[in-house]
Image (spheres, rainbow, N blue to C red):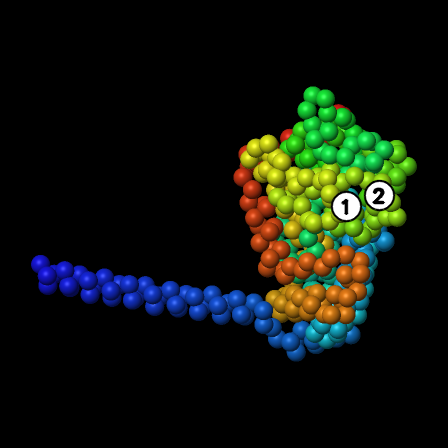
Amino acid sequence: MCKNGNEFSVFERAVLATLMIGFWILRSAFSAEAAQSRTFDEKAAADFYRGKTVTLIVGFAPGGGYDISARLVARHMGKHLAGNPNVIVENRPGAGSLVAANLVYKGLRADGTYITTFNSQMVLQQLLGQPGIEFDGRAFNWLGSVSSSQSACGVHRETGVTHIKQLIGPSGKVVNMGGESPGSGITDTAAVIRAALAAKFKIIYGYAGSRPVANAVLSREIDGMCISWESFTSDLKMFFEPQKILNVLVIFGAEKPKHSWLENAEAAEAIAPNESARTLLKLVYAPGKMSFPYAVAPGVPADRLVALRTAFDKTLADPAFVSEYEKYRQLVPKNGEEVAEIVRDLLATKPNLVSDLKEALKQRVGP
């Protein structure tokens, strides 16, 4: 019996050794593939891009956050791209940036001379099956993103509302929140806070962008708005300086940033009443992890794609760019692979959760 047992033990060790050898071979292969995905024929890429113009198509009008970000990227990216082409910005606003996303995905040459930046919420709209979307976020070649954002909701101080609990429950106060069309970040944030936390937000639809909504709050046409916290701390500082006229009530995520303007705010996930509510909040929050994303079309030749990704990464690490960008807002870069993973995870959401989210985001007349 001892001999048989020893023989079995030797056999077992042999099998284990074979498996380990196989594992190392596979791991080496994957490592080689990963390394290859970030190497390219620099001379071929340089020969292609030299003397050309790369157009960065922005899905919004000039002057907004996406436009400002794109112009900063364009100003620095050319010196990091093989062949040092000229990089220019072209604004193609429409349908909350859907026009630009569709155009680059299928309407222009997929040769690596067109880049687009559009609202990351458009990927959520793909998940929800909204009409007009002609792209698949999983097939875009993502270069990366320059920021991440937590959406926040605030109301004018003249409402007398200083805490989200004042809007919840039978005696909760109703406040009018500015919205664009369903599908925009401004609108969907307010809608999901209403659904997940039972906050009495009455959404006033039809505003044409964040600035008109902000102006309506300032003029007291409406009570408040939801937008990224980064917009409040950059583009919309007039709500807080020289005097505070907006009370921020709630911010997405499980924790709130440490900031004096958030003194009475609550982290949405932390006060959600159940797991279903937390799931809704996480789904709508997901695109914020890749704010200001940049992508090129499917079919861009592999060498040029790697050249573009490399140039994008170098741009976001360039001290001159960082210094300039962080005068505007915080830089929280992600590379193309990280953005692609966020997109894949979001679009893999189970159908029952998608149905719940669709119900939560439906346009409603009242709270």
Towards the viewer: 94 or 63: 63
Residue extending farthest to the bottom is: 43
Q: Which amino acid lies under the numbered mark 1 shown in the image of this protein?
A: Trp
Viewer can see residue 33:
yes
Q: Are marks 1 and 2 in contact (CB under 8 Å)?
A: yes
Q: In this rendering, is residue 241 above or below 116? A: above
Residue extending farthest to the left is: 1
**Marks 1/2: CA–CA distance:** 8 Å
Residue 190 percent across, percent down from the top left: 73, 36
Q: Residues within 10 Å of mark 1 (few under 14, many from 20)?
A: some
Residue found 83% across the figure and 36% down from its top:
156
Residue 194 percent across, percent down from the top left: 69, 31
Q: Residues within 10 Å of mark 2 (few under 14, many from 20)?
A: few
Residue found 76% across the figure and 40% down from its top:
248
Residue found 60% across the figure and 51% down from its top:
342
* Rendered image quadrant of residue 85: bottom right
Q: With 7 as the anchor, is 125 left or right in this view? A: right
Residue 21 percent across, percent down from the top left: 34, 68
Residue 299 percent across, percent down from the top left: 63, 60
Q: In this rendering, is residue 79 above or below 158? A: below
The residue carrying mark 2 is 244
Q: Quadrant of the C terminus?
A: top right
Q: Give the secondary structure at mark 1.
A: helix
| Total numbered labels placed on residues in the image | 2
The residue carrying mark 1 is 261
Q: With 225 as the anchor, is 251 left or right in this view? A: left
Q: Quadrant of the N terminus?
A: bottom left
Of the two numbered discs 1 and 2 on the same chain, state the one appearing first in sequence. Answer: 2
Q: Which mark is residue 165?
A: none
Viewer can see residue 181:
no
